[in-house]
Image (cartoon, helix red, strand yellow):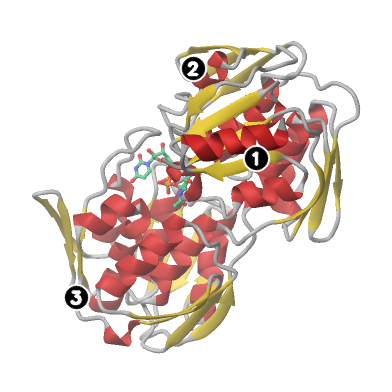
Amino acid sequence: MERYVIKGGTALQGEVEISGAKNAALGLIAAAIMADENVTIDNLPDVSDINALIEAVAAIGATVNRIDRHCVIINGSTITSHVVEYEQMKKIRASYYLIGALLGKFGHAEVALPGGCNIGSRPIDLHIKGFKALGADVVIDHGVVNAKADSLVGNHIFFDIASVGATINVMMAAVRAGGRTIMENCAKEPHVVDVANMLNSMGANIRGAGTDKIRIEGVEGLHGTEYSTIPDQIEAGTFMCAAAATGGEVLIKNVIPKHLECISAKLIEMGCTVIEYDDAVKVKVDGEMDGCRIKTLPYPGFPTDMQPQMTAVLALANGNSMVTESIFENRFKYVDELNRMGAVIKVEGNTAFVTGVGELEGTQVSAPDLRAGAALVIAGLAANGFTTVDDIVYIKRGYEMFEKKLAGLGAAIELVDSDKDEQKFKLKVG
Ligand code: UD1
């Protein structure tokens, strides 16, 4: 089975190029099917989640022309089915974006209900309430969401919770609803803005994305466009944490520094130097880092998707830290693995109490989910000796060429899929 083998202890140095944002690209791919013309999406990250959603879109009949690893042309004029099977949903949860896209375009979507996942139970009740508010009849039968409407009509929608998924999904349907939709308490994450921008470039009329109130004037149809995905805030943040944990100096390129402010602010508080450029940030560590308090919050707060990676850094910092997870209920599964590496972290309720230890010891660990997997790699990069990270299939869902990018910064890391290759790597790096 594929795993990463890491020899820790090298301070990362150099430059790394960040890929397109996975979570933005998932929304863009779903939105693309709403036009009957070519929609070209560039700067896609080449990760398994994206490839799974592209497969789901092809499975309903959309024409998919993969230009290269980072560019796809999607044409929704050939769609023959409004049904997204459980097989697709199992591979990629964000297939649920096809409910909003298909409902908006055809007035009908039948999509398998996503289950919970490794970070907790993840309901889609807010998505469904939004579709109903637009006049759709939504029934859940045998685990399938069946949404139908003769015609969608704009409405005033207030989301109980600022949900990224519900905001994007309902926004897609509302683009084709008659009249005006006002959505309040919307998620403000950069990928919400990115999907709204692409829809606007297809002829939609969406204003206010990035604020908590989004106004949409329905349009009769959408046309083709060419669009480039924004850089990945979380991938960039992960490399910032890797630089910090290893005491390195890394220039992280192709980013929007504004999106990283919540992460930069914490690293600065811990004693790191963070320098912002137009489209890059440099993270540099001189001396030791201090612990801090972190609470995950919707954007522009500290992202839940950066919580595990930052906790790995805090495990190494001086003093006590507190990390409170306020978005998902089951996001500390990696803590036992970090503790096996010598970290001292105690979880009580939704808070992790971290006692900084200065040094971690390499061992064999398993990635419980995508971001937790990245956190274990960061810990391995900083730890003494060898760390093996199993179950990297999760990491490959969201990080493009993770090991290659890290190796480019001087890390001793290799993806292996046999004990023999693991031994070979260990002999090579001593
Ligand atoms: C998206 C991201 C995910 C990130 C999360 C929070 C994608 C593909 N995934 O997930 O990486 O961790 O935002 O930034 O973009 N909720 C409900 N009912 C709903 C919808 C959500 O109760 O109908 C709750 C969730 O359980 C959670 C909170 O709202 O507690 C926020 O979830 P949400 O923003 O919807 O997350 P996702 O869109 O699933």
Compared with 221, 52 (above or below) is above
Say whether residue 17 is left or right of residue 52.
right
Given residues 103 and 383, the one toward you in this image is 383
Dot 1: element: strand
Q: Which mark is residue 81?
A: 3
N-terminal of the pair, mark 1 or mark 3, is: 3
Quadrant for the N terminus, please.
top left
N-terminal of the pair, mark 3 or mark 2, is: 3
Amino acid type, label 2: Asp
N-terminal of the pair, mark 2 or mark 1, is: 2
Residue ID at (26%, 81%): 79
Report how far apart the C-alphas of labels 1 and 3 lie in the structure.
44 Å
Amino acid type, label 1: Ile
Given residues 288 and 196, the one toward you in this image is 288
Quadrant for the C terminus, please.
top right
Tell which tag, 2 or 1, sits nearer the viewer. 1
Residue 289 showing in the rendered view: yes
Dot 2: element: helix
**Residue 392 image offset from top left, x and y in percent:** 47, 41
Q: Which mark is residue 413?
A: 1
Q: How many marks?
A: 3
Compared with 291, 228 (above or below) is below
**Residue 394 image offset from top left, x and y in percent:** 44, 43
Given residues 221 and 61, the one toward you in this image is 61
Amino acid type, label 3: Ser
